[in-house]
Amino acid sequence: VVFSPDNKFLVTAMHEPALHGWRLADARHMRMTGYPGRVRSLSWGIGGKALATSGADSVIMWPFASKDGPMGKEPAMLAPLKAKVTMVACHPKQEILAAGYSDGTVLMVRLGDGAEILVRRNGSPPVSALAWNAKGTILAFADEDGAAGLLTL
């Protein structure tokens, strides 16, 4: 369960491969569907303009810039691979996100144009954790076998 940074929306992952959300001002609810797998990771972009999610072979970015959030809108899809996205973490100060995949890959993705930087190659267990420090200068990641790494920017 996550609140948007402006506290206008509440979004929760469901047991099914979908999200359920509410606009808090009037309790209007929304469903965000179309995922091939369960959504296990959610992260708000800068200012809450978009919500990055796992659960597909691309990072699914739901638009929240308008007062209606994603209602009636299609999501953007970034960083497609042949593996499922397992974790997402938006940068705290820049329009960048980190994505971890089921094959161990970790990518950094620029939200404006989808440009990708490889942080960790595939060939290891699924990524189970991703986090930026508060300044956005260090990205931490870990996999299901307990291997971890830090990328200092």
Image (cartoon, rainbow, N blue to C red):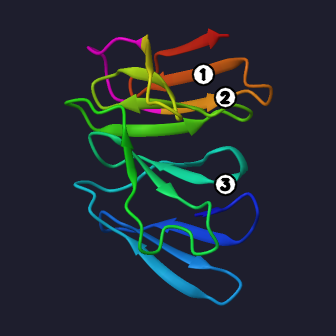
SS at circle 2: strand
124 relative to 108 in the view: left or right: left
**Front label number (3 vs 1):** 3
Q: Which amino acid does label 3 sit on?
A: Gly
36 or 70: nearer the viewer: 70
- Relative to 94, say whether 107 is above or below: above
Residue ID at (56%, 87%): 28
- Relative to 48, say whether 46 is above or below: above
In the picture, the quarter occupied by the N terminus is bottom right
Magenta range: 120-128
How many residues crowd mark 2 within 10 Å: few (<14), some (14–19), many (20+)?
Answer: some
Answer yes or no: do the residues labelled 2 and 3 have beta carbons within 8 Å? no
Answer yes or no: do the residues labelled 2 and 1 have beta carbons within 8 Å? yes
* 10 in magenta: no
Label count reads 3
SS at circle 1: strand
Q: Which amino acid does label 2 sit on?
A: Trp
CA separation, marks 2 and 3? 17 Å
72 or 30: nearer the viewer: 72
- Residue 95 percent across, percent down from the top left: 62, 34
Residue ID at (57%, 52%): 50
Q: Label 3, on which residue?
A: 48
Residue 84 circle label: none
- Residue 52 percent across, percent down from the top left: 50, 47
Query: Which of disc 1 and disc 3 is earlier in sequence?
Result: 3
In the picture, the quarter occupied by the C terminus is top right
Q: What residue type is labelled 1?
A: Ala
Residue ID at (58%, 61%): 64
Q: Label 2, on which residue?
A: 132
149 or 42: nearer the viewer: 42
Q: Label 1, on which residue?
A: 140
